[in-house]
Image (cartoon, rainbow, N blue to C red):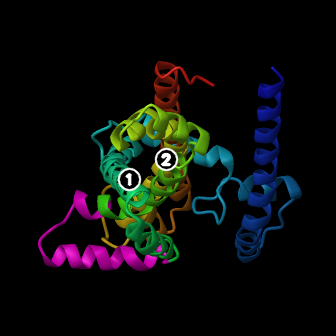
Amino acid sequence: MKKAFAILTVICTIVILWYGAAVKMNAKWSLEAASRAGVTLTTSELISKTLNQERPVLPAPHQVASEFWKTTIEKKITSKRSLIFHGWITLRATMLGFLIGTFGGIILSVGILHIRAMDMGFMPWAIASQTIPILAIAPMIIVVLNSVGIQGLIPKAIISAYLSFFPVLVGMVKGLRSPDQMQLDLLSTYHASKPETFFKLRLPSSMPYLFTSMKVGIAASLVGTIVGELPTGAIRGLGARLLTGSYYGQTIQMWAALFAAALLAASLVALVGLAEKAVMKRMGMDR
C-alpha cells in the first residue's frame, strides 16, 4: 500500500509539473495568435488554449493520452497509423538484435575468461567501441549493408546487437569470475576438469549477473533499433513514427510514439525479470 501511494505521488507530481511546463511553453504562440486577432485573453482562456493546441511545443498529458488511445485501441493493428503495428516492426528487429547481442556477449565472455590474449586484447576494444556515438555508426552500417544488398530487418538488428552485446559481455565476465578461490580450490580437490568447473561452478554463479545485464541489454537493444530506423528514412517502426512526426511538426504523435517505446521497453525488461525468477527458482537461487 505504501509503495502504491509513493508511486501515485510521483506520477501526480510529474503530471502537475508537465501541465505547468505545457502552459508556459505553449503560451507564446497563443498570445501571438490572440494579438493578431486583436483579442485579449483572460488567464483561464490562455490556459485552455495552451492545453489544446493542434501542434503544441509541449503537448499536455491528456493530448498524448488521447493520441495514444486513438492509435492503439481505435485503430486496427494492421493500419499504418497504429502504434501496435509500428511497435511490432520495431519489436522484431529488437528481439533479433538482442538475441545476436546476447549470444555474442556470452561467447566473447567465455573466450575472455579462458584466453588471456583475448582478455588483454579484446576487452579494451570492446570498451572503446561503446564510446562511439551510435548516431555516428548507424548510418555507416546502413550504407555499407545496403551496398551489398542487405536491407530491412538485418541492418537494424545489427545496430541493436551492437548496443546490447556490451552489457551482456561485461556482466558475464564479472559473473564467470565471481567464484572465489576457496570454491575453485574445493573443486580442484575433487579433481574437477575445466569444463566441469565451468558448468558446475562458474556458469551457475554467473546467472544473476547475466540476467541483470540482459535487462540493460534489451532496453539498449530497443534504443538501437529505433536509432537504426532514423537514417534509413523508414516508413514503418516507432523510429519512423518519430521521424514523420518531426518532419510535419506533429509533436503529439511523437510523444505518443515515445510513450509506446517506453512501454515496450518496460514490458521487455519485465519479461526478462520473469525469466530470471523462473530460472533462479529452478536452480534453487530464488531471491
In the picture shown, does residue 12 fall above or below 137? above
Q: Percent from the top left, x then y, of residue 63? A: 61, 48
Judging depth in this view, the residue of 180 and 23 nearest the camera is 180
Give the quadrant of residue 163.
bottom left
Residue sitting at x 40%, y 41%? 198
Cβ atoms at labels 1 and 2 below 8 Å apart: yes
At mark 2, the secondary structure is helix
What numbered label is drawn on residue 254?
none
Instruction: Tell me the CA gap for discs 1 and 2.
Output: 8 Å
Which residue has dot 1 on it? Answer: 110
Residue sitting at x 80%, y 40%? 10
Residue sitting at x 31%, y 62%? 158
Task: State the residue lying farthest toward the left.
Answer: 149
Residue sitting at x 51%, y 58%? 254
In the picture shown, does residue 54 fall above or below 210? below
Magenta: main secondary structure: helix
Q: Percent from the top left, x then y, of residue 109? A: 41, 55
Q: Amino acid at mark 2?
A: Leu
In the picture shown, does residue 74 fall above or below 220? above
Which residue has dot 2 on it? Answer: 176
At mark 1, the secondary structure is helix
Q: Quadrant of the N terminus?
A: top right
| Residue span colored magenta | 132-156
Q: Percent from the top left, x then y, of residue 230? A: 38, 68
